[in-house]
Image (cartoon, helix red, strand yellow):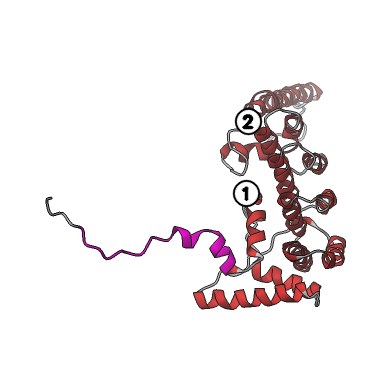
Amino acid sequence: MPALSDRTFNPKAWAKLGVVSLGLGAMAGLVWLSMWAHEHYVEVPRLLAQRFDDPPGHVGDSTTRVSHLGALAVPTLLADLDGEDPLHRSKALELLSTLKDARVVPALARGLRDADSGVQLAAISGLARTGSPDAAQPLWAVLERTDDLTRLRATIALGLCGSHGDAQRLLRDLLKAQGTDRAAMAWSAGRIERRIAHGDVHGYLRAAPTPSSPEDARRIQNEVDAVRVALDAGRDVAAQGQRLSELTDLDYATWDYGHQLAAQLLALSGPLALHAASGADVLAPPKPTERHLDLAPR
């Protein structure tokens, strides 16, 4: 053990230790700087160059990795909205909708005014995917349109991102609507209230149970039909909307929101209607003719 009178660790030694510490700190800084430069000037551009490898509505490795870039990807994707290819504009909107950035919702709202209907649908799906209450406001303008393609999907999209105020507005306005429009507005209002009750601001609710048998499907279908009759009569529309949501909700823990929004419109008519619309009966093999194959020579 050194004696208490040992003075070998003098100010000169402390100075040497400080120099070594500064050198190690500088080396650590250079390592961090090289990693930062590689990410921003090599890795990020390489990933962004692959952003259109997956078509709209599909998710693969490139889509997943670009989505994980966060705000670093936003400037490039915003610039893509001025491109000539509508598929690229659609994919850019789809990718933007996965990012948490203040520029996302305004960009998606801009997509609603695109000249291409496919890009408009991508914008509607993107707004729904954000689950943000701010995404509901631009959707209301689409509900004023006359074309069913965008209007009805925007109505469903409201159910995934709207707030309590949006639900109340839907309930007031649905009495002026008819048919599928009224059902879609009631469903959206009901789903908003159910989502708020579950405390999930991102719009996720468990899908309605799948019928366990033909008899169960018929039972659910009868209940859906009864709800639709009550809605057409304007009876207790708030409760009927929530019940319609409980009976017909699809699963939205998926990538292709565009498909789910379209399928939800079919599901509003009940499980038997959805089954028929899916073409399951059309694709069933034909019944055997019971004719024997004649191989006798002629």
Q: Which residue is rendered at x = 68% and y = 41% of the image?
A: 118
The type of residue carrying mark 1 is Asp
Give the labeled residue for mark 1.
Answer: 256
Q: Is residue 245 visible?
A: yes
**196 is higher (above) or lower (below) than 133:** below
In the rendered image, residue 278 lying in the magenta stretch gets the answer yes
In the rendered image, residue 166 lying in the magenta stretch gets the answer no
Is 172 on the left-hand or right-hand side of 56? right
Where does residue 34 sit, x and y in percent of width and height?
Answer: 68, 23
The type of residue carrying mark 2 is Leu
Where does residue 181 sit, x and y in percent of width and height?
Answer: 75, 61
Q: Is residue 98 visible?
A: no
Is 228 on the left-hand or right-hand side of 237? left
Q: Which residue is rendered at x = 63% and y = 64% of the image?
A: 267
Judge the density around disc 2: few (<14), some (14-19), many (≥20) Cα neighbours within 10 Å. some
Give the labeled residue for mark 2.
Answer: 47
Count every numbered label the image shows and give the total: 2
Label 2 residue SS: helix
Q: Which residues are magenta?
A: 272-293
